[in-house]
Image: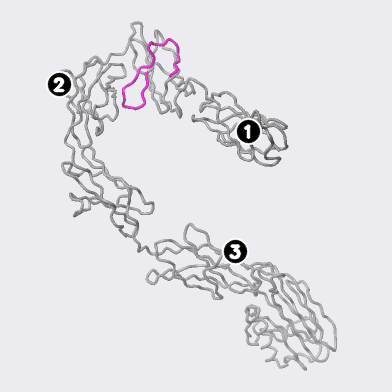
Amino acid sequence: MSRTAHFAATAAVLATASTLLTVAPASAATTCNSPVFKRQFFANTTFSGTPKKTDCDSAIDQSWTGAPVSGLPSNNFGVRWSVTRDFGSGGPFALAASGLDGIRVYVDGVRKIDLWKNTSTTVSKSVNLTIPSGKHTLRVDYVNWTGSAKVKFAYTPRTSATVDKVKPLVPTGTSVAYDSATGKAKLSWAKNKEMDLAGYKVYRRLKGTAFGGSPLATTTATSYTDIPPATGATYYYEVRAYDKAGNVSTGTADQPVGTPDRTAPDAPTGLYAKVGPGAVTLAWDTNGVTDTYRVYRATAPQGPFTRIADGLDSAWYRDTGADLTGRLYYRVTAVDPVGNESAPSVVADTGEPDTTPPAQVTDVTVEGTTAGNAVRWQTSSDDRHVNHYEVWAAPEGASDPDGPETVFGLSFNDQRAAAGVPLTYRVQAVDDYGNLAPVSAPVTATRPAPGAVAVPTGVEGTPLDSATELTWVSVPDATGYRVYRRTDRNAAWTRLGDRPTTALRYSDSEAPGVSAYYYVAALDAEGRESAPSESVQVWRETPATPTAPVAPTITLSAPYKECTTNDCAPHGGTGVPLTVTLKHDRLLSGYTYRFYGPSNSGYLTTDGSTITWTPSGPGLYTFEVRAIDYYGRSGPFTSVRFMVG
């Protein structure tokens, strides 16, 4: 075979291995680009001394008669080929060598084929081996002692799925470029180094979802162009390499593409309008995907509507410029981040304006304490539209110097009242439209000056299941103490207990299940209260109750059944889980329970309402449980029996 024919055949073989070798021109250059071999000719069979010639060779498939190059003898010469290349993920390979005379093949300096003898016939050998990932060096040594010279070598990946279990490496250099004008996303990556590479699989997913099992596309190129839906959503792409044995690499890092949003969001829903003093409050349901809202107002249901607010990032608005003397109509639109505006919401209106004031507030009382004057009143008889109350305070014969206090409850503590100065209080109800009720009948009180004892200190409050326990430090010369409570910072203080206490503690057995504030006042020899102590806040998850929790109800999961007087048949069995469901009408901290019978779990605790247990053997078992109040008080035990098959 001619050298040209040899080259053509070898190039075809290597092309099937996904790498087409190119011939470097023979020259004195000693550097050859991988995967081209560097070839060296030696005038001896020991590869010693300076090569007579060095060039590049794309394929090892030659035969010579006589000297292969100038300066070499026709016999007793050597030729060495070497190449270092990146094998990617590596894997199973076949090395095939033949020659006349001697040939040796090395991988990273380790001999893999040894046909080293003078022969008159061609010798050959094939070796299957696994080449690790990364770069490795192949070296082929050939010697001709006498006669004709022939040498041939090839290395090829073994691509049978039963042999090759090594997946390709993850493609590198992944990037994506998106053209918003054309809507095209071009994904690019670097070519893999594996010789058995078959191609690439491209995947796409919507943000927040997983990649599907099937690829968007497969390709043998190192780029792919896609047109993702232009919905304003973000899509992610990844590339996976696959080889001829069907092994697939791990995916590349996700490459995001944000598409333009040309779709308007949904119209807001649930819009309502509520009239309040001096303003209309609007609220609607957030759609969860828009950034801002616009509010429009009109004096007729068909419009025209005028925009009164823009760029709202919350689903409510207070229209302080509304004319409450007429009926008003509102609608709201949603605006997405790129400016797409939704269709308007359903129109909401304020209804016909109300010009009728609430009824006069009655039963106003006031009591002077050293913490301030406590003003209380009853709900207005026409409280359906009452928005708040205004409390006026003034010295007798004068007017309130700084205007009324706005109160949303039914009491007020005037802590700014000066001691020893009589003050007269009046209360007015104010409805949603700002209509004022007639002023209540006046009541008068004087804040007393503190008594001649010190202020109690060290007040602490501890929530217990039966009460909130308050303690404080003894005050010299005090004849007793009074305790006050309120649940709002501005409300009137309520004195607890009918009589003063001489103890340094007090149990508030009617403590509500909310945040409450307490203060303590000491009494002097004349029964006068000291100034109030520093208030202490106590938060309760449950109201105080006088009794421990009752036993919970117990439900056993199928197939288990509670034993009765007439039926205690076995159900379930060893290894079959049982779930016990507990029910109680209180907020608890948990339960204490145990299973006992052929085996005993011992007492355990749980803060949940379900308990899963697996019997270790058959027999009659008892489940025993009791409820534990939120602050640790335990109720009575109850139990059920059941038979395990």
Give the extent of the magenta segment.
484-508
Q: Is residue 144 left or right of residue 629?
A: right
Type of amino acid under label 1: Glu
Residue 299 percent location from the top left of the image: 18, 49
Evaluate whether residue 511 shows in this view: yes
Mark 3 or mark 1, earlier in chain: 3
Residue in front for this viewpoint, 633 or 260: 633
Q: Quadrant of residue 197?
A: bottom right
Q: Residues within 10 Å of mark 1 (few under 14, many from 20)?
A: many
Residue 303 percent location from the top left of the image: 19, 54
- Residue name at image x 79 percent, y 81 percent: 103
Which label lies toward us, 3 or 1?
1
Alpha carbon distance from label 3 to label 1: 54 Å
Type of amino acid under label 3: Thr
Main secondary structure along the magenta-highlighted residues: strand
Alpha carbon distance from label 1 to label 2: 77 Å
Placement of 198 over or under 557, stated as above or below:
below
On residue 250, the disc is 3
Q: Secondary structure at mark 2?
A: loop
Residue 40 percent location from the top left of the image: 71, 83
Please say whether residue 251 is one of the residues in the magenta stretch. Answer: no
How is the protein colored in the picture? one colour
Q: Quadrant of residue 527?
A: top left
Q: Is residue 639 left or right of residue 49?
A: left
Q: Secondary structure at mark 3?
A: loop
Residue 300 percent location from the top left of the image: 18, 50
Q: Residues within 10 Å of mark 3 (few under 14, many from 20)?
A: some
Placement of 627 over or under 66, stated as above or below:
above
Q: Residues within 10 Å of mark 2 (few under 14, many from 20)?
A: few
Alpha carbon distance from label 3 to label 2: 85 Å
